[in-house]
Amino acid sequence: MIDLNRALDLDDPDAGDFLAGLQGNIVKGHGRDFTAHVLVRMGEDVPAVRRWLARLAAERVTTAAAARRATRAWHDTGGPGEPFAMVVLSASGYRHLGVPEDRIPVPDEPFAGPRDGEYFRNGMKVPGPRTFNDPPVAEWEEPYRGRIDAMVLLADDDEHRLDATVHDVVTEAAGAVEVVTTERGSVLRKKFPRGTLVIEHFGYQDGVSQPLMIRQDAAEEIRRRGGTHWDPTAPLALALVPEPAGGGHGSFMVFRKLEQDVAAFRRALDDLAVVASRPVAEVGAMAVGRFEDGTPAVPTVTVDPDADPNDFHYDQDPAGSRCPFHAHIRKTNPRGDVPRVIGAPAAFERARRVVRRGITYGERPDLVEGGVADAPATGVGLLFMCFQGNLDQFAIQQEGADSNAFVRPGVGVDAVIGQNTAPAAQTWPASTGTVAFAMANFVRMRGGEYFFAPSMAFLRGLADAPGATA
């Protein structure tokens, strides 16, 4: 019996069956360079919808066990690896399939509140218990304003093969669902002196710090990066919950299309550098919490010189003189600020982490040799995805990022992703003393939905639902 309150031990005799019952990309990311996110609205022929989902599960969906085998094979051969697929359902999708309300997934972890289930059951268009500053639904991109019942996530290292898979999946879906929109993502990379790294559109290394829910993965990271200050280990319950009356496990997913105004962000850094009399690289590190190559603003060393530095804690910088409280990675993963400043338990803070699985979208001709010179203001961004056992884990992070008062009054919003119509000027370390300067509103949410990634047993069982084989 697998204990969700611990990281998974691959040596556990039940680990193989456990991973075979989960969809991939939750416990560990799929790792492909190209993605397609096919968002659909279910049709009125419910048996046809059930048959289509069950067929996807049988023929395409990648289990967590299969994903680990594919990763090992990729390391052995160098790629391009195997195609990846998963299916996630919204609450409206569950209802459309005829799932009773008492079988729709709900949070199941120690800090879940009485209203936390509202996020999933009501959907992203309805404000939840926490307040964050997304644009009104009328300003979302048109495909996201209506009902979205499911998303099929397809991924591959071979973009042409992914194109063919998308075509086949959409063709197979005909008569069962309507494709609302298909978003395409691709990994963005940049060369640094220490190697070629995955970046996001503002230009900073992305995906460095992730909660690790497999014991052996966490041990390997600590061996290479160090574990004096930070433990990346996380229990399975950080992302997984039991399905009601189903016997399997799944995970809540947040999907948000976030547009990044790269031009405005760079102008702000240039202006701040002048005001603070510090190099742009330094003020950028104070805004993000890391330098462009991923080096943390808080001094950090690694055991392996080739490892990504991540062994730090904000007990090393309690006043925020190196990494201000409004820095992006400090806002979203406070590493000790919550117990130190607010007084909440350290266990509560660690339980609010999310498992990020996003990917960049949009073309960057300004990064291509001989391309245009100007950074984009629109058309590029992040297809943000994260998994968690309770959607409040995401909500508390987004609320804190948008708030002028987290972790304490007057701090200001997250300098990178904070959305606020009245952002307070943050306090920035300068060459002498400090300066006040407002950085905010470089990221705009364009639409999204809350989903749940069902177990393989649930998806396969749809073929046995009444009328599904008619």
Image: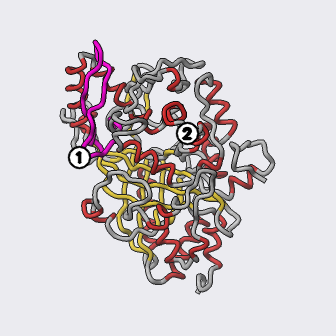
Q: Is residue 331 magenta?
A: no
Element type at marker 2?
Answer: loop
Is residue 35 found left or right of 368 in the rendered image?
A: right
Residue 182 bears which disc, if any? none
In the visual, does 423 lie left or right of 128?
left
Q: Position of residue 435 (x, y in %)?
A: 26, 22
Tag of residue 344: 2
Identify the element where label 1 is drawn. loop
Q: How many marks?
A: 2
Q: How is the image coloured?
A: secondary structure
Q: Is residue 428 magenta?
A: yes
> Which residues make up the magenta segment?
414-443
- The crowd level at tag 2 (other Cα within 10 Å; few <14, some 14-19, many 20+) is few
In this rendering, the answer to whether 294 lies above or below 93 is above
The residue located at (42%, 54%) in the rendering is 130
Where is 315 relative to 449, above or below?
above
In the image, residue 266 sits, relative to residue 43, either above or below, namely: above
Mark 1 lies on residue: 378
Mark 2: which amino acid?
Answer: Ala
